[in-house]
Image (cartoon, rainbow, N blue to C red):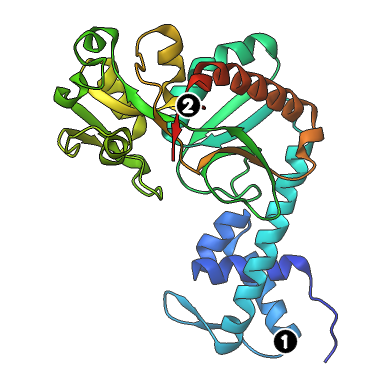
C-alpha cells in the first residue's frame, strides 16, 4: 500500500465527523454541505479500501479502523491550529494577553493598569483572571503570572516578587490592636487560598513563631485572598495579609502592617512566557513596565526582609 497521503480536505472532513459523530454538524463546522462532506469521507474510505463509519438510520459510528485513525488526526489538526494561532500572534503588535490568578489581577495588576496605559497607549492589554494553568498555544495567551515554587519546563521563567505574610489592619483598628500584646484579643481574618503552602503560612504558625499565646484558629475564613483583604479594608478584622496583594492598600495607607515579623514562604510570583517572546516589541514593553512596578513595590516590603520568619 502506498504511503502517499490522501487529500487534506478529506482528512479534515473525517476528523470533524469523528469528533462530532455527525456528518451534519461536521459539515456546519467546515462550512460545506453534508453531501460534500460525505463525498470527502467516501473518497478517504476508497483510498483505504475499508469503511471508517457505520452508517446508521439517524447517526454514524466509527468502525474499528475509524477509531484507530481518529486520535492521531485530532492531535495533528490540533497541532496545526496551535501553530497557526502562534504564527498569527507573532504578527500582532497591538494587543497582549496576560493571565494571572483572580486575586493578583484584582489587587496587583488592575490598580496599576493606568500607568501602563499612559506609557503605552497603543498596546491593548487583555487580562484573563484564572487559576487554571493555561496553554500558550491552545489558549492564545502571551504571558502568565504564576504563584508557586516550581518552574514551567520549556518556558522562560523569571522571578517577579517575593511574598511576605504579616498582620494587616485599618489604621483605626491599629489603634486597638497595633501591639503584639493587644493582638491577642483582635478579631482575625483567614486567607485559606494559601493553605497549600508547606510549611504553613497561617495565623497559628505566625503566633507560634512570634511567641504569642493565642489559638489563632477562630474568625472568618475566605477562599480568595482578595476577599480577605477586602474584609480587612472594611474594618472587619486583622488579616494575615500577603504583601503583594495588599501593596496598593499599604502604599495608600488604607491598611497598615504594624509588625516587622512576617512569614516568607518559598513560593513566589514569577513571569512565564514562551522563549524568544521577549523580543517582540509589545512584550518587551510590558516586561519593562512590570519589572519597574515590582521594583517599586519592593520598597514597601523591604522592612520585612531582615525580620522574615521561616
Give the foreground label among 1 and 2.
2
Residue 189 visible, this angle:
yes
Q: Which residue is mark 1?
A: 48
Position above or below: 259 against 134 = above
Mark 1–mark 2 Cα distance, whole angstroms, equals: 60 Å
Front position in the image: 220 or 49? 220
Which residue is found at the position 61% from the left and 50% from the top? 151
Q: Which of the two residues, 138 or 217, is positioned nearer the viewer here?
A: 217
Q: Is residue 40 left or right of residue 219?
A: right
Indicate which disc, 1 or 2, sits on the residue closer to the N terminus: 1
Quarter of the image for residue 245 reads top left
Q: Position of residue 37 (x, y in %)?
A: 63, 67
Q: At 61% from the left edge and 24% from the top edge, which residue is drawn?
A: 125
Check the image and report above or below for 29 versus 157: below
Quarter of the figure with the C terminus:
top left
Left or right: 58 in relation to 68: left
Q: Quadrant of residue 217?
A: top left
Query: Within 10 angstroms of label 2, few (less than 14), some, or many (20 or more) residues?
Result: many
Residue nearer the viewer, 238 or 276: 238
Q: Which mark is residue 244?
A: 2
Q: Is residue 203 above or below residue 76?
A: above
- The quarter holding residue 227 reads top left
Callout 2: SS: helix
Question: Dot 1, crowdedness within 10 Å: few (<14), some or many (≥20)?
Answer: some
Residue sitting farthest toward the front: 211
Quadrant containing the N terminus in the rendered view: bottom right
Amino acid at each position: 500500500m502506498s504511503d502517499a497521503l490522501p487529500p487534506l480536505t478529506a482528512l479534515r472532513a473525517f476528523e470533524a465527523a469523528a469528533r462530532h459523530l455527525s456528518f451534519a454538524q461536521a459539515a456546519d463546522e467546515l462550512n460545506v454541505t453534508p453531501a460534500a462532506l460525505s463525498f470527502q469521507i467516501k473518497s478517504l474510505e476508497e483510498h483505504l479500501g475499508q469503511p471508517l463509519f457505520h452508517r446508521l438510520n439517524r447517526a454514524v459510528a466509527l468502525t474499528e479502523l475509524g477509531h484507530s485513525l481518529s486520535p492521531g488526526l485530532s492531535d495533528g489538526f490540533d497541532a496545526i491550529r496551535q501553530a497557526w494561532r502562534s504564527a498569527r500572534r507573532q504578527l500582532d503588535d497591538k494587543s497582549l494577553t496576560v493571565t494571572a490568578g483572580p486575586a493578583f489581577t484584582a489587587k496587583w495588576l488592575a490598580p496599576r493598569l493606568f500607568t501602563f496605559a499612559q506609557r503605552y497607549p497603543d498596546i491593548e492589554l487583555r487580562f484573563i483572571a484564572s487559576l487554571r494553568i493555561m496553554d500558550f498555544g491552545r489558549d492564545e495567551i502571551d504571558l502568565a503570572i504564576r504563584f508557586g515554587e516550581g518552574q514551567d519546563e520549556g518556558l522562560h521563567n523569571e522571578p517577579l516578587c517575593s511574598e511576605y505574610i504579616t498582620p494587616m489592619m485599618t489604621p483605626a483598628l491599629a489603634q486597638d490592636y497595633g501591639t503584639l500584646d493587644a493582638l491577642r484579643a483582635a478579631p482575625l481574618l483567614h486567607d485559606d487560598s494559601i493553605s497549600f503552602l508547606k510549611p504553613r503560612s497561617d495565623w497559628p504558625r505566625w503566633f507560634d513563631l512570634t511567641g504569642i499565646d493565642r489559638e489563632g484558629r477562630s474568625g472568618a475564613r475566605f477562599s480568595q485572598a482578595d476577599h480577605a483583604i477586602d474584609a480587612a479594608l472594611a474594618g472587619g478584622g486583622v488579616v494575615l495579609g500577603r504583601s503583594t496583594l495588599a501593596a496598593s492598600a499599604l502604599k495608600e495607607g488604607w491598611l497598615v502592617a504594624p509588625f516587622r515579623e512576617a512569614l516568607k514562604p518559598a513560593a513566589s510570583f514569577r513571569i512565564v512566557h514562551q522563549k524568544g517572546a521577549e523580543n517582540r516589541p509589545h512584550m518587551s514593553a510590558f516586561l519593562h513596565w512590570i519589572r519597574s512596578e515590582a521594583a517599586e513595590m519592593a520598597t514597601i516590603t523591604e522592612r520585612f526582609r531582615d525580620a522574615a520568619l521561616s
